[in-house]
Image (cartoon, rainbow, N blue to C red):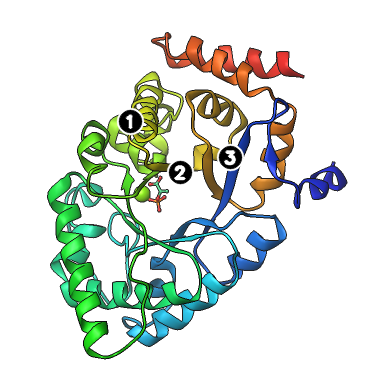
Amino acid sequence: ELHRLSEFRDRPALSKDGVNVTLRANIGLISDVAVAQRNGADGVGLYRTEFPYMTRSNFPDRNDQYQLCKKIVESFEGPVTIRTLDIGGDKGLPYFSPPAEDNPFMGWRSVRVSLDNRDIFRTQIEAILMAGCHGKVKLLFPMISGVEEVRACKEVIEEAKNNLRQENIPFAEDIPIGVMIEVPAAVQMCKFLATEVDFFALGTNDLVQYMLAADRNNPLVNKYYNPLHPAILQAIKYVSDTANRLGKGVCLCGEMASDPLSFLVLLGIGIREFSMVSPFIPRTKAFLSDLNCSDATYIAEEVLQMGGSEQIHDFLVAAVNDLH
Ligand code: PEP
Ligand code: MG
């Protein structure tokens, strides 16, 4: 089995009936880079930049961030999607403690913190733009709920570019800009968000928690936290169809991408780009190589007619068994 999986590392991700899929890596620490390379990741679909912030005793300066991003970007031929700071909620910084909040996940977190700390935000964006000179970089904003936030982020990009120009520092002029679709309002508004950005990253970890009102880290409500809930699948279908229609890329980077039942239905829905914890990449390729995409399409069409999570789960289990 391990031998078989290692064979898949260097092969393209292809279904039995010849449909191409892109499998990228989710990374955080620099040590994840080697793991991603070893597992044949096609670039990085999600670089969680809060990790280097969490392991330090104060905010890293621009050069530190630039050097780190440069190193990562140079390690991949495929694009590296760098997400701006996503602290708050469950992710704290030892040197930057937000005020106590009753509902931290619905509070001052992620891009909201960045937009309220413009210098820190602009510094990070400058570092990312600078790293764009060393390979393919995409810039991703988390926790977006509407077009105003995207426009505010784009203003900070312009400030960052002006600063770099004034300092005569080379940077990538035209890096693609994207937003996480992880707040229910962003699903509903994706048609409008598409006019502002080049791509979407479907963050199902948060999307599931916010759509189903079930904390992603609370074991008491774990049974309500269900990525195969019909509401979630309908939302993903809407975002995927809208992105395809408007010619925008969409990459699904939540944990569900590496679950075979979920992968099957996501493929059938029309998602063709996934990002996951790297060790899952070879086994996803193996699973895909045994699968006709046309069967996945049929399976997803059936599933999208269903109103119950259990019914969906049982149907997918039976479908996967039938495939083998
Ligand atoms: C997500 O929310 O699905 C996601 C990929 O980001 P994170 O897990 O870092 O919140
Ligand atoms: Mg998230």
- Report the side of 122 relative to 283 (left or right): left
* Residue that badge 2 annotates: 251
Q: Position of residue 139 (x, y in %)?
A: 36, 61
Q: How many marks?
A: 3
Q: Nearer the viewer, residue 315 or 55?
A: 315
Mark 1 CB near ligand 1 (8 Å cut): no
Mark 2 lies on a secondary structure that is: strand
Identify the image quadrant of the C terminus: top right
Q: Earlier in the sequence, mark 1 or mark 3?
A: 1
Q: Residues within 10 Å of mark 1 (few under 14, many from 20)?
A: some
- Report the side of 196 relative to 17 (left or right): left
Mark 3 to mark 2 CA distance (whole Å): 13 Å
* Type of amino acid under label 3: Ser
The mark found on residue 258 in the picture is 3
- Report the side of 192 relative to 263 (left or right): left
Mark 3 or 2: the one toward you: 2
Q: Earlier in the sequence, mark 3 or mark 2?
A: 2
* 237 over 154 or under it: above or below: above
Is residue 213 visible in the rendered image? The answer is no
Rendering quarter of residue 93: bottom left
Q: Position of residue 164 (x, y in %)?
A: 27, 83
* Type of amino acid under label 1: Thr
* Type of amino acid under label 2: Cys
Residue drawn at the location 44% of the way across and 17% of the way down: 309
Q: Position of residue 56 (x, y in %)?
A: 40, 80
Q: Nearer the viewer, residue 233 or 212?
A: 233
Mark 3 lies on a secondary structure that is: helix
* Residue that badge 1 annotates: 242
Mark 1 or 3: the one toward you: 1
Q: Residues within 10 Å of mark 3 (few under 14, many from 20)?
A: many
